[in-house]
Amino acid sequence: MKKVLALILGLGLLGACGGKQGGGANNVGDGGDTASTEAVNYDKVQNTLEGTISRAEPFSDGVAVIEEAGNGRWLIDNTGKKLWSHQEKLPDNTSLQGYFVSGLCVARDLSTYNQRVVMAVDKKGEIVISTDKQGFTGICFQYNDMMRHSSLQDGYLVAYKIVENHTGVVLQIGVLDTKGNWLIPLSEDNPISRAVKDSGRIEYEPSYLYLGEGFVLITDTRMGVNGFILNIKTNKWFDAEFNINDYCGVFMENGVMMSAGGNQKVTANGEVSAPPVHMEGIYASGLFLGGYAETFGYYDANGSRAIDMSQYESITDHGFQGDKALIEIRNSNGNAFFTLIDRQGNFAFEPIALGGAALSPNSVAYSEGILIHRSYEEFIFYNEIGQRLFTVPNASNAVGQAAMRNMSEFSDGLAIVQHWSSSVNYVCSYYIDKTGNRVIG
């Protein structure tokens, strides 16, 4: 039987930092053009953050949230210029979370139970949406920290209000647009409120997964991992319960979404059925990996096989991104190789060895036209035709163990390197561009 692992790649980079770090990437060639080592538009701004970033978030909407060691949290632009600080713009005990999407970023109140999300802030530091302005208790937080795929990308924020009266405690749910207007007013007429009404706890803490095209899967901590789907555009709830873990990384496309974990095909009108064939991969860009033995391959939502993969015994599927998909192929010796394929199943380049068995689920990633291969010794960067561009060393720490060095995927043209500083025994972060230049931090 063929074995497949569907991957969701999302790396949050945290740490404490101190001390100045040198270098960045080493540009190398491997049968193709090498990347330029010249800085691109960053010489206009001094890298004043070098060696000081203790926490870094990926860039989105041209900005990123960082924490500077000993100097609090800041919003910076893509040249490293500080735009404003938390201390300057936000109330005490609040902290921006994740990314800016559609010009907004949510913030938590660190003094509340479970650190509730209580506001949304624009890139100028102005509070656009808050508990004081709109009268809700909190904003549903994005389950599993998948903030990049939040409902903000389509202009929605899901909010809730806890209401207690002589009959008990109820949970109201509503939806706001990015200007703070109610698209769906707060109401207790929802299946989550009915499911948890008699629990006797006042502290509700709903979370959600945004599924795309106006569909959102909402749950409450006391419901475990089960939740209900709301169609924001029609203000209609699906009758069935869904396991929220089965839908991480699952998105509605043209009114259809499919979950390998839940073995479900769900349509926009609420129909739930089994997928047309056994799923073993992510349904993305209209295709998913599935089938067995001679039927193994990529299928569309109707069950028609678009790509025959029956010649391979084991494939790790990262899902299609438009016309390309990153796959890992394991040979009969158990060794893994990676490449990109197109929608006809053609390799973009001869599969490259991962160095035996894959080191971890994040041993290879693909974003914004760049492939990142992590080995024990280094991070190796390739373009979409398999040309080796540059490397970032994966150095060891003071006691000879594997370094605490991590790499994010590219976002807005920049990626985060998190690295161990042996001189101060801390972890720092910095940003590199697609030529391997260390440009911020």
Image (cartoon, helix red, strand yellow):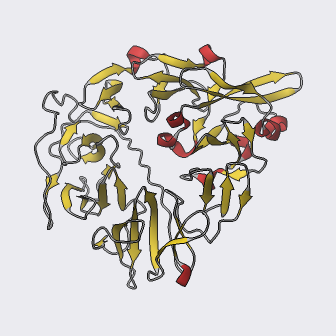
Quadrant in the picture for residue 364: bottom left
Q: Is residue 35 left or right of residue 217?
A: left
Q: Residue 269 at what x, y percent from top left?
A: 72, 48
Task: From this view, report whether residue 355 is shown above or below residue 55.
Answer: below
Q: Residue 11 at what x, y percent from top left?
A: 41, 48
Q: Residue at x 31, y 27 (%)?
A: 76
Q: Is residue 12 left or right of residue 40?
A: right
Q: Residue at x 17, y 33 (%)?
A: 42
Q: Residue 273 at what x, y percent from top left?
A: 72, 62
Residue found at the far right of this picture: 167
Depth check: give the residue in front, 174 or 400.
174
* Residue 135 in view: yes
Quadrant in the picture for residue 85: top left
Q: Is residue 2 left or right of residue 49?
A: right
Q: Is residue 157 left or right of residue 160?
A: left
Depth check: give the residue in front, 269 or 104.
269
